[in-house]
Amino acid sequence: MTGTFHTYVSGADAAGRAGAAGNDGAAARPAVDTAAPAASPSTAGRGEEPVVAGIDLGGTKIAAGLVDRQGRVLASRTLPTDAPSGPAAAMDRIAAAVRELAEEAGRRPLAVGVGAPGPLVLPEGRFAGTPNLPGWNGFALRDQLAGRLGLPVAVNNDANAAALAEARLGAGRGAEVMVYVTVGTGIGGGLVIGGRLFSGVNGNGVEIGHTTVDPEGPACGCGNRGCWEAVAAGPALGRLATERLGPPPGRPGGRWTARQLLDAAAAGDERARAVAEEYARLLGIGLASAVNLFNPDRLVLGGGVMARYPLLAPAMEAEMRRRALPANLAAVTLVPAALGKDAGLVGAALLAWDLLDEPAPRR
């Protein structure tokens, strides 16, 4: 079915179309000399190996880097998203960062890949009401960034980008069907089948964090109630800890954070460990759904909460195995992600490489 699998999202002439985009757009200032012949993989970057720019766009910070074909991050920097200043200002900061990285490294990026919070509308690369970036709804991310840089731009969901990186370069290498789940401020997912990223018809195909696990559960940022994200993302662990334990030590009236609770549990606090186990079972419920829905041979877990994977894994996997279909369980291996904080940045760069490798459309 057309539009089901996406290894990239953009057209070969995205930069040209973007240059004519008027709303919210700054005058284009290309990262490369667009009057010169287009760089090829054998000539780009002052005789060096070619590179692309990867952008991991988050609700609070943005990671930008230059990445080669092997997935090596050659130069990078972090900058604030400053979401209240609006998407156009953020695009200006991203474009400036790409230019600065290119100048510092002496390498000209051939394309840009962006992993951004969903939901998105693809292939247009447009925001569609992401709860983590209020006020950005409808902003044409792909075209606006392409217009600023004079480069082709590929856009996909940030969890999809991280999934692609783990599948090709990390803990999912060699898997036929890999499901990636990231647990942090929210819960996101990605599905890679035979090395190809599955994004659904419009790019929002594996929003596993928004499957309902408790119809009467807490409100979710998506507008629903009882989503797995609302019940089992990092903030939910903080709420659970405060409900079970009261305020954290030395903070009368304060509330636990996920990190505080997991650190206390790892340090041997038995009450904190009991809360962590209760929380891990909530994660296991959603993982069972992933196993039943997608029948993967590899289930990769990433995100900030999974920094404590060894602490959470026993109860999490036990609950998953209690609830998932036996035949599907027999095929799957549960593993922690391997690429850490670079997964989103590297995955975004892979989107750009896939864009460059896609045959040019027929005219």
Image (cartoon, rainbow, N blue to C red):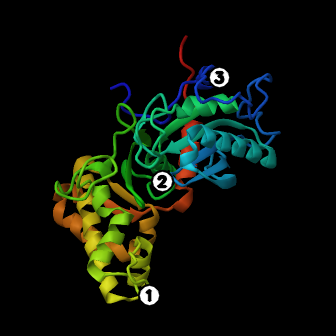
Looking at this view, is 35 or 222 the one in front? 222
Secondary element type, mark 3: helix
- Can residue 128 be seen by looking at this rendering? yes
Dots 2, 1 in contact, CB < 8 A = no
Looking at this view, is 207 or 43 the one in front? 207
Secondary element type, mark 2: helix
Q: Nearer the viewer, mark 3 or mark 1?
A: 1
Q: Nearer the viewer, mark 3 or mark 2?
A: 3
* Image x and y of residue 32, in percent: 76, 32
How many residues crowd mark 1 within 10 Å: few (<14), some (14–19), many (20+)?
few
Report the disc number at residue 288.
none
Report the disc number at residue 19.
3
State which quadrant residue 37 falls in: top right
Residue in the image at 45% along x and 61% along y: 303
Looking at this view, is 32 or 257 the one in front? 257
Q: Which residue is mark 2?
A: 166
